[in-house]
Amino acid sequence: MERSFTHEIESLKLGEGGTFHGEGILAVTKALLQSGVSYVGGYQGAPVSHLLDVMVQAREYMDELGVHVEACTNEASAAAMLGASIAYPMRGAVTWKSIVGTNVASDALSYLSTAGVIGGALIVVGEDYGEGASVALERTHAFALKSSMWMLDPRPNLPTIVHMVEKGFELSESSNSPVMMELRIRACHVRGRFATSPNRAPTVSTRNQLAAPAAFLYDRLSHPPATFRQEKLKVGVRKPAALRFIAEHRLNETFSGDEHSVGIIVQGGLYNNLTRALQILGLSDAFGACRLPILALNVVYPLVPEEISAFCMGKKAVLVVEEGQPEFIEQDIATLLRRAAEQPGLRELAQTKLHGKDLLAMTGEYTAEVIVRALSRLIAQHASHIDTAGGDGWLQSTGAAREQAAALLGSPLPPRPPGFCTGCPERPVFSALKLAARDVGLPHISGDIGCHAFATFEPFSMGNSILGYGMSLASSAGVSPVMARRPLAIMGDGGFWHNGLLSGVASNLLNKGDAVLVVMKNGYASATGTQELISTPSHSARDATHGKSAVHADRTIENTLRGLGVKWLRTVDNYRVADVTQTLREAITTKEPGLKVIIAEGECQLERQRRLRPQTAQQLDAGERTVRTRYGVDEDTCTGDHSCIRLSGCPTLTIKDNPDPLRRDPVATVIDGCVGCGLCGENAHAAVLCPSFYRAEVIQNPSRWDRFMHRVRGAVTGGVAP
Amino acid sequence: MSDARPITILIAALGGEGGGVLADWIIDAAEHADLPAQATSIPGVAQRTGATTYYLEIFPLHRAVLGGREPVMSLTPNPGNVDIMVASELVEAGRAMQNGYVSPGRTTLIASTHRIYATAEKMRMGDGRFDSSKVLEAAHELAKQAFLFDMRAVALAHGTVINAVLFGAMAGSGALPVARAACEEAIRRAGKGAEASLRGFDAGFRLASGALKEDAPDAPPVAGKPDARVAAEFPADVQEVLSLGVTRLIDYQDEHYAGLYLERLKRVLAIDGTPAHRLTAETGRHLALWMSYEDVIRVADLKTRPERFERVRKEVRAKPDEPVVVIDYLKPGAEEFSSILPPALGAKFLAWAERTGRLRSLNIGLHINTSSVLGYLTMRSLAWLKPWRPRSYRYALEQSLIERWLDEVCAAAKREPQLALEIAECVRLIKGYGETHRRGVANFLAILDALVVNPATDDPREQARTVARARDAALADPDGDALAADLGRPVSLSKPVIWLSKSP
């Protein structure tokens, strides 16, 4: 795993009166333990990876408490885990990145929410929306609505997040429904503190097992005819129970202000940005003492009709601050107000004007700037006695600053998207693909989710579609039959086990497809933080290789494919670019029918370096002979055409001023940080680029023999010179 | 309502620079100073070498006086509201300005002036680098106060990571609401590498607070005395570049060859109507490079010089007592072999290789340990072929191409100096080795044929513009698509240039 949580694990053990310092998502982990969860599962992905990663590393302590932790192979298996809470009084929590994870989990979630739970079931989703998002931009809210799962969106400070986790379990149990909690990227990574309470060992646990299964009860099965009754329960029993709980426990918060004409209803998660916007307008202080009343929805579904009516009563207008689209909450409130206004005593509500997306941007993150603009318009329309000049001036000045910067900079700055790490074993595969394409033409490439998706950026700019995690091969099924040139699908080993094996390989074999699949076997789910897979090489295999790739030690993927009936199966060493190029050429052009699979081997360089660094340091300290390999470019033979860079994109292969006074264009150079993977030399060979690349082996702690040879060589190489 | 507001800090870093650790130090220092503080970040996949940001707020009032009240802090930075903008790299500082995070009334900008080039800048065929001076100018213009120096160099000099220097500069700028000692304590508490970090912190602090001045960059080398022949026969404004050319060609071949260089340039000088003899200077620059074309003899020569081994040692940061083994990646093939054959034989061999599809298949990948006795002697023996060079196929080829180019330059100079300059500049396209070189020559010839020999216009100024545009198009993409579009016809690449083998 990429990160070590030794320090954080200690924070998880804090008891009464302690103070937890740390990340929002780890505060959730602590809150789960304080709530007495029996089991936790999930699938990694930013921004929630740490929730589970820390528990996986804290296995010993989890065993002590009796908490079972499962690193699931995908979100569907995580969601299905919650099935334990249908029939047993045990609390469980699962986590994943949304929207993508919720999509994968949704089948199990439908059945779970239909059956209902008796033990609290909490789903913590990382709402990957706005700046830093890496997936399709959709809202998890839709799933909560369609499945009747309640949705929490706490104010983004640690005490509130922790409180809502604890209340979430109670809400789930009191309404027999699963509860989702959405946390935005910045809320997951926010560093703050909260006062801890002791962890509760679960009553049903690995240490306190159930003696026998629950009695057969058809009503707990999501199967007709029970499903008909269950749907009625959702609306007739569970939702009213949830509404009672939300209202009684005051999960939503009202902040009153002295200004009564307008009010704001906000998703809890956006409360801080709203407060900052009000501060910019001069309508709030730094502590949230605000002139406009605010209803902060820590529970965004279901909405309590009485709370909405009470808040809106007597106001000329209410603004709903709700990020993303469609505007589910705004529509919900519109319906609630309309219905309420038909009741005697509440008719006045018909006069309250409802605003939302008409004043706010339909899409994108709601930063303070976006909110200030909307508030300024709201106030102009309905409370013109409030002075918003400060905010308007601020908006103008920020716009002017950007324009001035653009003018001074002259042209747009070069983009800096994420890319393959230095020495990444996936980069050479794309170098080879670029070379193979010169001979056999570029095929249709189905991309996938994972580090290899960085090949969509320069210098490779490859990929025709991305359809989801593990979906690449499946997404070429419709292309293949209509394409003269055989298409190519790329998948990581993470994607392979997440979904690709069944959705892609099995389907292709069943349909006797004729496609090429490249599986990047780097040994881990690397893009999410190098979590382990079923095909991760064993610890002993990894230790035996030192800093070299260890992935060849595990053959689970190859064996699985052969077992499934794949006939054309090749394994290549990624760094041998010429071989990979030749294998790709062959796969694309061979007459052999059926699925062609290339296993592209090369262990994640992050893991290799993590192993190597302490070993090397130890060797050097002990005075042992250690060879450090680095690559370089001869600046006097490099002519500065940069074709090597267009074939690599390695962060340490870059450019510098041309030292030759007669030349103008910069020359290529290798900078510190080169891990000596050898790709630049291999590329120079495979593409017949130029003779400028060299490999330097620096012998640290040289032996006597090394020193002797060094002197002999020095005498020759320094002596016969021109 | 209270008027107090948090101090806001936005840190723009690149993956692997320790931006997260920097945020941790700041939060720790603030909390130990009893100031409410919050940090958040957008790492996501951006930690994989891309740009990442960290956003922090520190409330400048001690908890003791807040009486249990908690400030509500924002999770997103807002343009116009950033007190301290930190950028670990120059273009990232530019990006912060582009996004409005640097405002004259409020922002202290702390940025390192070194560049880490983006792929988009590195991969261009010519020079795709963003103009750093624009960012520096904008920084001084837009920030309330700016602290700009090469923090990577400082970090390297102190054996630490850039985050420590950035932290020091923040503290030294006076904009951080935490005292120096508290910052240093935070670094110590974090443990791991604390001593090195503290050194970097100290250097950053002193540079920002003005206690220390940044080392001046190395002065450019002073031009030596001009070559005697150049001084005698060429005007002063071209002597420096031509002398460089002469030195290069003597090193490349001999005095006689350098003489040929000057003879060729005299033709150009005689008709040079450009101010400051720009045409002679530019032609002289390109001619020197072209005449010292990189054949196997040249490459072997350059790779076996003592100063080369010294340069390699320096580049890979080998300590004085550490032996360094240097292994060269070479892949000579039909073209390299033919280039040292006599003209007639070389042409025949290459034609055969092309006809039979062996142009690429004959290449042999070699890893030569040039630092070993045997490897060195192998390479050196190739360099010893230098006296043979003027009798080689490649020599004949290059010289006739050079003559053709010079003829066109001189012919154009009589019509319009600008046109001559543009044609001279086209040599820039001929670069690299193997296929890259073939593509360069093909592009060069295509422009020559289409726009110089057979121009579509009688107006030499318009013609000059079309040549310049085509040259830019040739540099726009490696496959020649833009050039083909500009010329309105495909540029044929496959053939090596053997059509000139008739006369050496």
Image (cartoon, grey):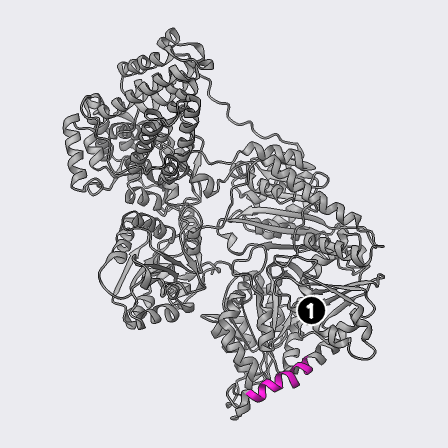
Q: In this view, does A22 lie above or below A203?
A: above
Of residues A232 and A183, the one drawn nearer to the viewer in this rendering:
A232
Rendered image quadrant of residue B95: top right
Mark 1, residues whose alpha carbon is within 10 Å: few (<14), some, or many (≥20)?
many
Residue at 55 percent of width and 58 percent of height: A133
Check disc 1 and report its element: helix, strand or loop.
loop
Q: Is residue A435 left or right of residue A374?
A: left
Q: Is residue A241 a member of the stretch shown in magenta? A: yes
Q: In this view, does A321 lie above or below B76?
A: below
Residue range in magenta is A228-242
Quadrant in which the C terminus of chain A appears: top left
Pinpoint residue A221: horizontal percent, then vertical percent.
52, 87
Query: In this figure, what is the number of numbered marks?
Result: 1
Pinpoint residue A291: horizontal percent, then vertical percent.
82, 59
Q: In this view, does A199 lie to the left or right of B311?
A: right
Q: Is residue B143 left or right of residue B405?
A: right
Residue A69 showing in the rendered view: no
Please state which amino acid type lies under the numbered disc 1: Asn
Of residues A522 and B208, the one drawn nearer to the viewer in this rendering:
A522
Q: Is residue B338 above or below residue A171?
A: above
Mark 1 = which residue?
A: A298
